[in-house]
């Protein structure tokens, strides 16, 4: 005991302790970070079972107990993959609040663990796109300039030149992408939710998808040209010009012409 | 209210016609009668000019102090532009408002009447002008006793040919190519592979999963020089979509134009030529962003809404030995909006190509 006690009071002990602590933290972080990513793709049997229970309680009234869907009510979810579940539930679009032209994003009703369990169960029904890894959606690894080319060709006609969103037909709309997380952008391209077409990996490769994410991430730098007015094009710009600017011009004209009191 | 007998409807009664109300009684302004108000208006005007001076200072300070960091930084460009803009706005509006306020409150306030002068000149001046013209004609020799026919002829010739110096280069620059049949043909033809816009990667039929939409250019387009690339791309762009074959209503006479639910349509709107590319996967509707023409991809891209008159032209496609999607032929009609002689002469050649 004396030997241990003596060793405990060794002068290098605090330094060794700090080093050991650092090594422990780094080691845990190194193990934890990839495990968070793989957890979504390699789910345990427990997750699948929990997901099935969540599905039966929250989704089955429309999609059916076996997720086979109902004609004219809800699509079959066999083969849509974990990515579709993570997108639809993770953005609050599902469970749907009310039927309408399209299901809008709203406050998310499940925590990420529950979403992963739901995704694991739906993914177990049939092969489908998986949730992307953090590396696949890291804007820092993408090329924003190439992303702009891809975005301009494939996305800008609906989502606007910088992803501000835009109108479609009969109450449907392409939502703004400026607040959307990189994971959800990636999953939307991969799965084609609602009106949006599918952009599979043969059409927009995973690298190009990451470039698109980098381009959208770059928009958080803001517009160099001043007020972007939501970047939704001539509607907001016209409103500004006709109501506010023309109003100011009319008001000042009246003031110039009015007689001083 | 006037008496009933004076009411003459719409007829103008000279006796009861519109009276010139004249100028109202002159009402002095506050600044005219009250010395305090006068001083106040003076201070207000001076303050407006002061705002202008402050604006100028803001613009200069913004230029010299905010501009020093990284010149490519967008946030900084926005800051500098905004403050310089605000400064210039204040500088201009301050002077403008100050000058008007000055004139309205402090400068003299008399109603003044200034009659128009008569438009007709005096007889004397009119005769003098005519005499001057006559004298000029006589002096020049164009008329009158001494005729100078050589001068007259050379002047008319010079006047007649002078516009050529402007017109000939203008007409020459329009180019010698007046062949409008170019509109009828695109880069598509038998065996031309479909490639992805913008990088030109080829597309296999297996790549196009249900619900996918590919933005397509003809293979080889990117090898053209810039000028031709732009003009050919403008005609040749195509949207490639795969529907569930059960949803696809195959058009009569076009039974073999699609492949297992994959269809290709021109992206150029038949209304005024905007690129139609807003594809809604669930309804199979294709919306033009310019004027909301809507086409039904599942039903031959027929117009279901909006000002377009004709369906989008369909590109007949097939799959070659290596699995790539290829065009069977060019479009069987000119793409894009209607124009003069659109179908004249074009029908014979393209009908042959399609039926081969």
Image (cartoon, coloured by chain):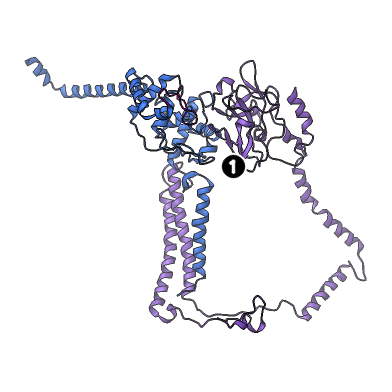
Q: Position of residue B250 (x, y in %)?
A: 65, 27
Q: Estimate how packed mark 1 is, as few (under 14), some (14 to 19) or many (20 or more) residues with alpha carbons within 10 Å.
A: some
**Quadrant of the rendered image containing residue A63:** top left
Q: Which residues are magenta?
A: A64-78
Q: Position of residue B259 (x, y in %)?
A: 62, 22
Which residue position holds label 1?
B292
Q: Is residue A257 visible?
A: yes
Residue shown at 62% from the left, 27% from the top: B263
Colour in which chain A is drawn: blue
Q: Nearer the viewer, residue A47 or B104?
A: A47
Q: Position of residue A250 (x, y in %)?
A: 52, 63
Residue shown at 46% from the left, 41% from the top: B72
Q: Is residue A143 visible?
A: no
Q: Is residue B71 magenta?
A: no
Colour in which chain B is drawn: purple
Q: Nearer the viewer, residue B4 or A116?
A: B4
């Amino acid at each position: 005991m004396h030997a241990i006690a003596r060793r405990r009071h060794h002068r290098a002990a605090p330094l060794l302790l700090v080093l050991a602590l650092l090594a422990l933290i780094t080691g845990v972080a190194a193990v934890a970070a990839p495990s968070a990513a793989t957890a979504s793709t390699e789910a345990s049997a427990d997750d699948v079972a929990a997901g099935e229970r969540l599905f039966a309680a929250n989704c089955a009234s429309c999609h059916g107990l076996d997720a086979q869907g109902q004609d004219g009510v809800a699509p079959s979810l066999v083969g849509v993959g974990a990515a579709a579940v993570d997108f639809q539930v993770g953005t609050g679009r599902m469970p749907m609040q009310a039927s309408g032209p399209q299901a809008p994003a709203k406050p998310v009703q499940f925590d990420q663990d529950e979403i992963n369990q739901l995704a694991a169960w739906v993914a177990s029904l049939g092969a489908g796109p998986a949730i992307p890894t953090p590396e696949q959606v890291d804007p820092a690894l993408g090329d924003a300039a190439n992303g702009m080319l891809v975005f301009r060709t494939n996305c800008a006609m609906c989502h606007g030149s910088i992803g501000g969103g835009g109108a479609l037909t009969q109450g449907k709309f392409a939502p703004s992408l400026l607040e959307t997380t990189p994971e959800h952008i990636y999953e939307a391209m991969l799965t084609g939710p609602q009106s949006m077409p599918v952009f599979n990996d043969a059409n927009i490769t995973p690298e190009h998808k990451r470039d698109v994410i980098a381009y959208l991430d770059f928009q958080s730098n803001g517009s160099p040209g001043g007020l972007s007015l939501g970047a939704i094009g001539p509607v907001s710009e016209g409103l500004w010009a006709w109501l506010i600017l023309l109003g100011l011009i009319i008001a000042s004209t009246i003031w110039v012409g009015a007689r001083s009191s | 209210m006037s008496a009933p007998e004076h009411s003459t409807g719409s007829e103008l009664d000279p006796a009861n016609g519109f009276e010139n109300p004249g100028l109202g009684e002159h009402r002095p302004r506050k600044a005219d009668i009250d010395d305090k108000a006068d001083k106040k208006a003076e201070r207000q005007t001076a303050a407006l000019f002061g705002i202008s001076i402050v604006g100028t200072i803001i613009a200069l300070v913004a230029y010299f102090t905010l501009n020093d960091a990284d010149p490519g930084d967008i946030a900084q460009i926005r800051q500098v532009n905004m403050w310089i803009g605000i400064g210039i706005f204040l500088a201009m509006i301050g002077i403008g408002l100050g000058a008007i306020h000055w004139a309205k409150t402090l400068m003299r306030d008399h109603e003044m009447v200034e009659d128009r002068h008569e438009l007709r000149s005096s007889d004397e001046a009119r005769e003098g002008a005519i005499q001057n013209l006559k004298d000029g004609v006589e002096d020049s020799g164009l008329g009158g006793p001494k005729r100078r026919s050589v001068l007259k002829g050379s002047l008319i010739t010079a006047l007649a040919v002078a516009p050529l110096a402007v017109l000939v280069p203008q007409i020459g620059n329009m180019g010698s190519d007046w062949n409008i049949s170019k509109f009828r043909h695109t880069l598509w033809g038998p065996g031309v592979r479909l490639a992805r816009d913008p990088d030109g990667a080829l597309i296999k039929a297996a790549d196009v999963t249900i619900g996918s939409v590919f933005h397509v250019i003809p293979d080889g387009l990117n090898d053209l020089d810039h000028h031709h690339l732009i003009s050919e791309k403008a005609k040749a762009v195509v949207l490639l979509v795969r529907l569930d074959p059960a949803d696809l209503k195959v058009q009569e006479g076009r039974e073999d134009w699609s492949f297992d639910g994959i269809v290709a349509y021109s992206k150029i709107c038949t209304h005024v030529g905007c690129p139609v590319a807003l594809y809604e996967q669930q309804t199979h509707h294709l919306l033009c962003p310019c004027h909301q023409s809507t086409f039904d991809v599942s039903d031959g891209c027929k117009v279901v809404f909006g000002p377009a008159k004709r369906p989008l032209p369909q590109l007949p496609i097939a799959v070659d030995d290596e699995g790539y999607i290829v065009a069977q032929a060019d479009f069987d009609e000119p793409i894009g909006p209607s124009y003069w002689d659109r179908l004249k002469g074009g029908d014979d050649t393209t009908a042959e190509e399609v039926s081969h």
